[in-house]
Image (cartoon, coloured by chain):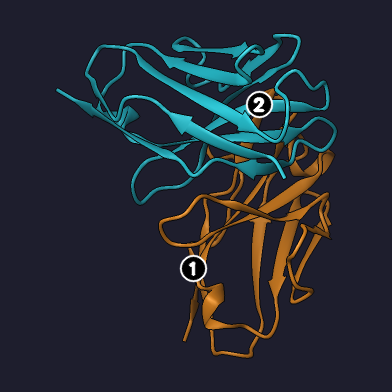
Amino acid sequence: QVQLQESGPGLVKSSQTLSLTCTVFGGSVSSGNYYWTWIRQPAGKGLEWIGRIYAHGNTNYSPSLHSRVTMSLDMSRNQFSLRLDSVTAADTAVYFCARSTIYAVTLDSWGQGSLVTVSS
Amino acid sequence: QSALTQPPSVSAAPGQKVTISCSGSGSNIGSNYISWYLQLPGTAPKLLIYDNNKRSSGIPDRFSGSKSGTSATLGITGLQTGDEADYYCGTWDSSLSAYVFGTGTKVTVL
């Protein structure tokens, strides 16, 4: 059973860069069978898909965040990462990493989430 | 950028049935598989239904999914207090090249 765990700073200053890492246990980020995905959820609001990365390095990003997002893989550490530039208070949210199947794009395993607060 | 519309809330008494609708378009629900996710208070979402109507591991048959055209429906029968949660639909949008979630529905057991 695969497990995912987010890690990173809980507080980021406005205009700076948010960086989070997701460590995968019981599975491999080098597997060609899955996409590795980031999702976020502001307090009291719904889920927002941020983007995904594939083992070969291919990425898809949300059109609304595309200009500020970069995702990467570290196969040696079995991790994938999110970088969000020029953050504002609107980027304050719980950030989830998840595994997505290739064919039907099902988010079948999720991390527990990491709260990131953007301060002024 | 929610592209899928769900009712904000549904409610019913214990033992009763509720249905949650998810409305989209031809570029998302109309041409891709739909999934449903359950989010209990203070926890991460969990996969409930995938490939339109298949239950994820460990999910009881009280939960069912269906899809028709550009809409999908989640049904919950024999409602229990433990079913009180937020439910989200989700699917790939081929026009956006992005995954889209529904707006979310809160289920309340009266």
In which quadrant of the rendered image does the N terminus of chain A lie? top right
Chain letter corresponding to the colour orange: B
Is the residue marked by circle 2 packed among few (<14), some (14-19), or many (20+) residues within 10 Å?
many
Q: Colour of chain A?
A: cyan
In which quadrant of the rendered image does the C terminus of chain A lie? top left
Q: Position of residue A76 (x, y in %)?
A: 64, 11
Q: Nearer the viewer, residue A37 or A8?
A: A8
Determine which quarter of the picture holds residue A38. Answer: top right
Label 1 resides on the chain identified as B
Q: Position of residue A73 (x, y in %)?
A: 62, 13
Determine which quarter of the picture holds residue B20. Answer: bottom right
Res. B91 mark: none
At mark 1, the secondary structure is: strand
- Residue pushed farthest left? A120
Task: Choose mark 1 or mark 2, whichever is in front.
Answer: 2
Q: Are marks 1 and 2 on the same chain?
A: no
Residue at (43% x, 61% y) in the render: B41
Q: Position of residue A83 (x, y in %)?
A: 45, 14
Label 2 resides on the chain identified as A
Question: Looking at numbered disc 1 in the image, what kind of residue is underneath it?
Answer: Ser
Q: Nearer the viewer, residue B71 or A58?
A: A58
Question: Looking at numbered disc 2 in the image, what kind of residue is underneath it?
Answer: Trp
Res. B9 mark: 1
Q: Is residue A58 above or below residue A35?
A: above
Residue under label 2, please give it: A36
**Residue A95 vs residue B53: left or right?**
left
Residue at (66% x, 43% y) in the render: A109
Residue at (83% x, 56% y) in the render: B68
